Image (spheres, rainbow, N blue to C red):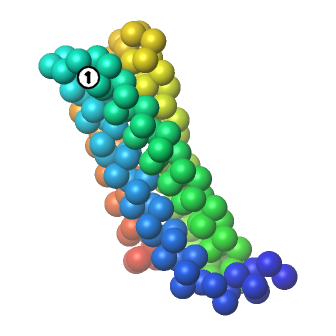
Amino acid sequence: MIGGFLAGWYPWIKALHIVSIIAWMAGLFYLPRLFVYHAEGGAPEVLFRTMERRLLHAIMVPSMVASWLFGLMLVSIPGLVDWGSVWPWTKAVSVLGMSWFHFWLAARRRDFAAGQNRLSGRHYRMMNELPTVLMLVIVFSVVVKF
């Protein structure tokens, strides 16, 4: 059984999950800030486009994939998650929200690359709060297990 096999690797899988989450969150926090400065001008367009592309494709996408992979490995370990509790479901919904935000950011990066951004720096500042709220729900769900 795959879950039984993974149980022996639990500390490593958990550590890799945490590391990939940290990298993903860093990108989810930083890319909207780049969009704020990009939308408001102040630096060469090519600089922002390069930074945004590299951040998304070199850091955010691999770390999101790794976060999902290691997270799914963790939940497949028998006895690790009590699916009758509320916390795994609040975490799951929040992770889906984070993933939606990731893809929303990717779409906004494509808009900038095409010269078609229609959102203000203020809009990006407000959207930058979403990953913080989702992160709080996820951490409290997992740690407090409400």
Left or right for 109, reference 99: left
Pick the front one: 85 or 12: 12
Q: Position of residue 19 (x, y in %)?
A: 44, 67
Residue hosting label 1:
38
Q: Quadrant of the C terminus?
A: bottom left
Relative vertical location of residue 8 with respect to residue 13 in this rendering, above or below: below
Q: Residue at x 45, y 69 (%)?
A: 18
Relative vertical location of residue 27 with respect to residue 113 in this rendering, above or below: below
Q: Residue at x 54, y 50 (%)?
A: 62
User: Residue 55 appears in which quarter of the rendering?
Assistant: top left
Left or right for 32, reference 84: left
Instruction: Name which residue type carries label 1.
Output: His
In this orientation, does residue 139 appear? Answer: yes
Extreme left residue here? 42
Relative vertical location of residue 83 with respect to residue 5 in this rendering, above or below: above
Pick the front one: 106 or 95: 106
Left or right for 39, reference 108: left
Q: Position of residue 79 (x, y in %)?
A: 67, 85
Q: Residue at x 38, y 69 (%)?
A: 140
Q: Residues within 10 Å of mark 1 (few under 14, many from 20)?
A: many
Q: Position of residue 82 (x, y in %)?
A: 62, 79
Extreme bottom residue here? 8
Secondary structure state at the residue bearing disc 1: helix
Count of labels shown?
Answer: 1
In this orientation, does residue 102 appear? Answer: no
Q: Residue at x 43, y 32 (%)?
A: 53
